[in-house]
Image: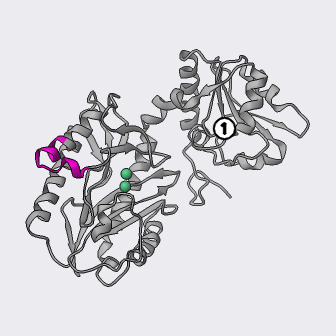
């Protein structure tokens, strides 16, 4: 049985949340000069309807007319069960089932009531091409239309991100159970994988254990390298909690002893850079200004060339989504936007460090979803 709160992966928010999103999406589509949205299975359908239906060769498609007419879900008769746990029934949406031999694209065109459509980017070409033929015009991507909706999280989404942040913080708090010298990165990662689920995630989406020189490669995941006393270790972990919102947090650990000299000084500069970027987050500031807050500090410390990636990325139903916290992105931050702040420094062949929190923009600043200490955490060797 599926309910709004089960742990099977079919869980979703109360139906009213989706009703509100559908109304706002229709209004934005209208403002954009479109006749409506055509949303096939994928993250956009999960956002609009709480449905994790899969895409097959037979078309399933949520039709959201810009006119304000009630949305309809077009679905193959034999796949009706796949929508049972979505919000469609509770919202009173019409389910228009179809069988092989029917021209489903003509059905969609008629429900849309025009030729100007925006489609989910997850729509397979298998459906897009015949649909464009039927409409007589090539649809645009709904990604841009839905951007302002998906980027600004509502209270139920922020609550889910908060639960995700607390869950991954509990995993970091347990790190001494697994991370010590003599063990391989892969062994440590296997233990973290289990803990991520124990602490409330549906599953682990990614686990990076970068020890010693491996920590200097931001793309490193895990290896059979044996962790040594004195290693600096980057641990970047996350995954979704019901109903699908992701955690993503990095902390850097020292094995056995607290480093002295340049490592200590450079880590301390990284910590100040991360803090400066978090402190800069508030409505009205641009995404690139947050990037600059971290970067300028590291440049001033002579560490600019070792910070080789953007400062952060938006997060929600996807681990990486808009807004991207990167130079050149002049998008203005608004309350409800959620993203990572994760500067790092990487010394090739030697060591690396990264500190990452998810923050949500509030009316006058931000609320961090992660609250573990930011210092280099020294674990017994
Ligand atoms: Zn991360
Ligand atoms: Zn991240």
Write down the region rendered in magenta. Answer: 296-307
Residue 299 among magenta residues: yes
Question: In the image, 206: left or right of 89?
Answer: left
Q: Secondary structure at mark 1?
A: loop
Question: In the image, 335: left or right of 79?
Answer: left
Q: Identify the residue shown where x is 28% and y is 34%.
A: 288
Q: Identify the residue shown where x is 16% and y is 77%.
A: 257
Q: Is residue 180 above or below residue 242?
A: below
Depth order, front residue of 201/348 = 348
Q: Identify the residue shown where x is 38% and y is 74%.
A: 185
Figure disc tally: 1
Residue 329 among magenta residues: no
The residue wearing badge 1 is 123
Depth order, front residue of 352/95 = 352
* Residue with the most extreme right position: 101
Main SS of residues in magenta: helix
Q: Position of residue 99 (x, y in %)?
A: 88, 40
> Is the CB of mark 1 within 8 Å of ligand 2?
no
Quadrant of the image containing the C terminus: bottom left
* Residue with the most extreme front position: 349
Depth order, front residue of 244/93 = 244
Residue 337 falls in image quadrant? top left
Say if residue 250 shows up in the picture.
yes
Depth order, front residue of 272/3 = 272
Q: Position of residue 134 (x, y in %)?
A: 79, 23
Residue 104 falls in image quadrant? top right
Q: Is residue 315 above or below residue 186?
A: above
Q: Position of residue 311 (x, y in %)?
A: 30, 45
Q: Is residue 140 above or below residue 290?
A: above
Q: How is the image coloured?
A: one colour
Q: Identify the residue shown where x is 22% and y is 38%.
A: 292
Question: In the image, 40: left or right of 188?
Answer: right
């Amino acid at each position: 049985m599926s309910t709004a709160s089960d742990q099977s992966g079919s869980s979703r928010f109360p139906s009213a949340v989706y009703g509100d999103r559908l109304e706002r999406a229709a209004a934005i589509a209208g403002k954009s000069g479109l006749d409506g949205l055509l949303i096939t299975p994928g993250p956009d359908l999960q956002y609009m309807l709480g449905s994790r239906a899969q895409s097959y060769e037979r078309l399933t498609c949520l039709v959201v007319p810009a006119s304000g007419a009630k949305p309809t879900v077009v679905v193959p008769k034999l796949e009706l069960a796949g929508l049972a746990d979505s919000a469609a029934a509770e919202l009173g949406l019409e389910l228009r089932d179809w069988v092989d031999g029917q021209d489903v694209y003509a059905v969609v065109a008629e429900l849309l009531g025009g030729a100007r459509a925006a489609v989910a980017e997850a729509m397979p070409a298998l459906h897009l091409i015949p649909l464009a033929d039927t409409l007589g015009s090539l649809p645009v991507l709904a990604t841009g239309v839905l951007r302002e909706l998906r980027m600004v999280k509502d209270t139920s989404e922020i609550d889910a991100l908060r639960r995700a942040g607390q869950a991954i913080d509990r995993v970091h708090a347990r790190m001494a159970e697994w991370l010590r010298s003599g063990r391989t990165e892969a062994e440590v990662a296997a233990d973290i994988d289990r803990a991520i689920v124990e602490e409330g995630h549906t599953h682990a989406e990614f686990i990076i254990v970068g020890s010693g020189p491996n920590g200097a490669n931001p793309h490193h995941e895990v290896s059979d390298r044996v962790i040594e006393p004195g290693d600096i270790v980057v641990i970047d972990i996350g995954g979704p909690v019901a109903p699908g919102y992701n955690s993503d947090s990095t902390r850097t650990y020292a094995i056995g002893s607290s480093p002295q000299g340049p490592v200590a000084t450079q880590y301390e500069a990284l910590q100040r850079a991360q803090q400066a970027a978090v402190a800069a987050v508030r409505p009205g500031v641009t995404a690139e200004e947050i990037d600059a807050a971290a970067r300028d500090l590291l440049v001033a410390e002579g560490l600019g060339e070792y910070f080789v990636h953007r400062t952060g990325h938006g997060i929600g139903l996807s681990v990486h989504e808009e807004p991207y916290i990167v130079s050149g992105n002049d998008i203005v931050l608004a309350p409800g936007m959620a993203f990572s702040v994760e500067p790092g420094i990487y010394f090739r062949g030697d060591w690396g460090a990264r500190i990452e929190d998810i923050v949500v923009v509030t009316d006058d600043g931000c609320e961090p979803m992660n609250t573990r200490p930011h210092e280099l955490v020294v674990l017994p060797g």
